[in-house]
Amino acid sequence: MRRPSSAFDNIVGAHDPAEETRIAHATASALLTRVRADDSGVSADRLVAFTAEHGIDEIAELWSAAPARTLPGALWRLYLVQLAIHSDPHTAALLYERGRVELPSVDAVIAGAPVPADPDEIVVLIDTILRGAFRGDFAVALDRAASFCRVQASGATHTADDYEPTEPERSSELTTRALRLSSYAQDLSASAALWRTGALA
């Protein structure tokens, strides 16, 4: 990830953590409010497509350092999940299907992917979830994203077990991925609960 620009440094007061936090929260709130006010859905579509066109650095400069269970932190995690799926939809689909089979919960139903889901359908699903965050019920979108992450984490964990005897390095990579996804799931679920009580800021 590239270093934030000098112009951005000036805006946030030379890395003043309090000011950076204030800007992260203000921009996330303003963005969400503005997009939700656009009934045409054009603004939401642009935001969903943003990372594919411009990368994630610009968003990272604003939101990546925000606490996980805040509005900017939740939006940042949604974009990270979307980027991961777009970057390697084939692996994402394999892990999702494995997790769907292995995970004894309703998470796959909540996430809402077709059964089974191919790579293109997984990409459509994550874009639909992100679009729902901007146009629909924000808490529902966060819950769907959390369920998606739990299914993926389960798939990564079980696939890691498969690789352990023959490809321990690949197994380690998948285990790390599973832990990260599990963490995202917890944070997104917590953020959804906070949003419902009006406490996600």
Image (spheres, rainbow, N blue to C red):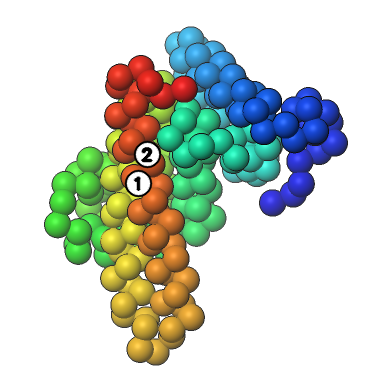
Label 1: which secondary element: helix
- Rendering coords of residue 7 (x, y %): 84, 31
Q: Amino acid at mark 2?
A: Leu
Nearest to the observer: residue 66 or residue 138: 66
Q: Are marks 2 and 1 in contact (CB under 8 Å)?
A: yes
What residue did someone put label 1 on?
185
Residue 96, compared with residue 69, is above or below; it is below
Label of residue 85 in the image: none
- Rendering coords of residue 186 (x, y %): 34, 45
Q: Residue furthest bottom?
A: 166
125 displayed left or right of 5:
left
Can I make out residue 165 in this image?
yes
What residue did someone put label 2 on?
188
Question: Which residue is at a point 35% across and 46% down the rendered structure image?
Answer: 185
Task: Report the Cα–Cα distance between label 2 and label 1.
Answer: 5 Å
Question: Which residue is at a point 43% across and 84% down the rendered structure image?
Answer: 168
Nearest to the observer: residue 111 or residue 66: 66
